Each structure stands twice: as C-alpha cells, then as structure tokens.
Amino acid sequence: MARILVSGAGVAGFSLAYWLLRDGHDVTIVERAPAPRQGGQGVDIRGAARTVVERMGVGDAVRAAHTGVRGFAQIDGTGRRRVEMPTERLGHSGGAVAEIEILRGDLVAVLRDAAEAAAASAGTASSGTSSLTYQFDDTITAVDRRPGGVAVEFEKAAPARFDVVVGADGAFSVTRRLAFDGAWRAVDSGYHRAVFAVDDPRVAAESGAEDWMTMYSLPAGNGVGGRNVLLYPARGGARAMVHFASDPLGLDRRDVAGQKEAVAEVYAGAGWVVPRLMDAMWRADDFYFDRHQRIEASSWHRGRVALLGDACAAGSVGMGTSIAIVGAYVLAAELRAAGTRDDDVAAALARYEARVRPYAIRNGKPLPGGLRGFLPSSEREIRTRLAIGGLLMRTPLARLMTGLDKNVDAIELPETWSPRARAA
C-alpha cells in the first residue's frame, strides 16, 4: 500500500483514484476549487476509453447521463441547417460527437461515486485499509523529490509526505510548473473559449437545434477574428460554447465578470439566438473561460512525480477525456506492478509514459483545416466551408472530416482488471 497524492478533482483525477483505491492505496485529492466543478462542455468517450469505463463498472451510469445529442450540425446566417453529421454516420467513435457524450460535470460525478465506492469497499475488506481524503479549496505550493518519497507543501493544509504525486490538474497544471523545471511548453492555439449553461427555454424552440449540437459561425468583427457559437441539449436544458480567434486578452483567470464582459463585447450584434445566449451567460453560475493551448512535455515523470491527462497532453480535439481515462488506467496498472524502491517507481512511471504517450500523440491532431478552418474570418470562407461540408457528407468521403476512428483504439490496454484477468 502506498500513500498517493492526486492534484486535480476532475476526470483524470477521479479515474486514477478509483483504480488506486481498488488496490488498497491511500489517496488524497487536492483541488483548487471548493468542490468538483459542475457543468462544463459535453465530452465524448471513445474507443479504448469505453473499455476502461466498462471495466470500472460505470458504463450504464455513463450511458444513462447521455446528453441525448444525435449528431453535429452547421447552420448558416439564417439558421438553416446546411451540414449534418449524425453519430451513426461516422462510426461509433468518429465525428464531432460520439454516441456516448456526457457533460463533463456529470462524468466527474459518476467517477467520484465510483472512487468513493471503491474506497468504502476496500476500507471494509479484511485485506484493505485504503482511504480517500479530499483537500478542496487548496493547492500545492512546493514539491520536493526525496529518496523514498515526495515532500509536498500546500497553500492551506499542513505539509505532508507521499510515496507518489500525480498531477492531474489540467492544461494549467501547478504540479507541472513546480516539479518539471520548465521541461515543457504551452503552444498557444490562437483562440479563447467559454462554456456556460443556458436557462432560457425559448432558446430550444427558436434555435432549431433540437437534439443536435449546432454550430453557428460568424466572421471577424468587434475587434477579434473568426467566431463561432455551439449550442447543444443537455438533459432538460441546453449549454452554449463560444470560440473566437484573437491575441491573448490577458484577463485574470478569476475575474469572471471581466471574462463575461469580454465575451458579450465579442458577440454584440450577432444574429440567430445569440442575444438570448448572452443574456443566459450573465445569469450562469458555472461559466468557464480560458485560452486554448496545447501542452508539449519532454517527460511525463520525474522521480516519483507523474503527469496525467491534460497536464501532459492537452490540446486534443475530441479525445482529451478518453486520453485521461485510458492514461489513468495504465498508470494505476503500472504502479500495481511496481516495487517500493525509487528505481521501481520510476520504472513504472516510465512504462506508463511509454504506453500512453504514442496513443496521446496519435489522438492529438490539431483541428481539421487549422485555426482558419475552425474559425473562418470572412463570410465567403464560411459559405465555402458549409458548401464543401454539405457535399462531403453526401459522399463516401464523409470520413475525411474526422480522423478519429483509426486512432481511438490505438493502444494495448494492460489486462490487469480485464474480465480475463478476473477469471484467471
């Protein structure tokens, strides 16, 4: 049994905690937010990640929380649907929307329940004494790698020593910044994004989105480049996500009011149902805003410290959640097979990276057509993209619009918790 610190109470953090707790480890999760974040965008579970979810025993719970989205559609300035990509047309794990799509907050809740159930089960078993401890509203401030462990200091909690520390704290990872000595770089993607709940029931009726994720593109304007708005249903409600190309705005990550003001200015005067979405944005208490970036880390592990999910592989289009779930499974499997010496732990973390990094690279492709393809800056470019997309979807070349299918299973999962291993 080891004492393991996981920084980040998200998909990667709770996925890893589940497997570690099943193996009888003591797990502490530290999270800057006062509680697991609710809401968030719709995320897809594809390929090998589906296998992991089934091995966790939460497949039914995930499917029950499906957003109900049938596919992805693009509309023109009049609100007319010009391109349709139904989930079944592009394969079980292809396209902008997979058959298993769930709000990020709902998925975190499912994974948290699973981790807590694993902790309760291990804690009552005669052979297990594992525990799950939370440190919300706190963060790591120092990491000192020492022989036989890692000394960690926190902003609020008392210093503590752990056998392993895992940074599952996203693209802006504190763990990476503190423990990896600049051996990584953040590659700016050229755009900002925001996501928020829409509480206006008129939006569904007026948008024509129904049960499709619907994208409305706008040309450059209001001081920024190309813009778009995505609207999709979310089990009784709706959510909006906006993207706009610009230089970094330099907004404080905690200045929510300033972020909302910036988004409102960018979309002032827009058509479709955007005015109603902006009104809903001001009322939303789950608003999230950031600058999209891709993370390139030369190493995912240093001694007894490892990175997981977006902390080391942010930037994937449509596969970030799946990479996190698969990575957590592999990392836990390698730690299970490791001894307690520094060399044993380091070797386990190296094996984890060797297995998952190629998978993350294959699934970390940039947006089709690059930034200009995602956020065209002129009306002419928008019309051309809609025309080409509509034509492609009526031909066998439709799969050219996504490169996901052939990569989503491009990893051999350890058999550690497979049905075959359980039966042996």
Image (tube, rainbow, N blue to C red):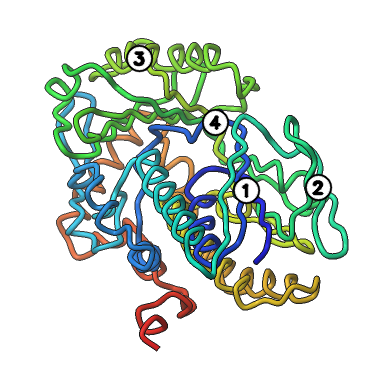
Q: Give the CA separation, mark 1 to mark 4.
A: 27 Å
* Image quarter in which the N terminus is found: bottom right
Dot 2 or dot 3, earlier in sequence:
2
Corner quadrant of residue 92: bottom left
**Disc 3 marks which residue?**
278
Q: Give the CA separation, mark 3 to mark 4.
A: 17 Å
* Image quarter in which the C terminus is found: bottom left
Tag 1–tag 3 contact (CB < 8 Å): no
Q: Residue furthest front?
A: 126
**Above or below 26: residue 71:** above
Nearer to us of marks 2 and 3 is 2
Dot 2 or dot 1, earlier in sequence:
1
Identify the residue shown where x is 16% and y is 38%. 211
**Disc 2 marks which residue?**
143
Q: Give the CA separation, mark 2 to mark 3.
A: 42 Å
**Disc 1 marks which residue?**
28
Identify the residue shown where x is 75% and y is 71%. 346
Tag 2–tag 3 contact (CB < 8 Å): no
What is the three-letter code of the residue carrying label 1? Answer: Thr
Q: Which mark is residue 74?
A: none
Dot 3 or dot 4, earlier in sequence:
3
Query: Are there few (<14), some (14-19), or many (20+) residues within 10 Å of tag 1?
Result: some
Between 244 and 373, the residue placed more toward the observer is 244
Q: Give the CA separation, mark 2 to mark 4.
A: 26 Å
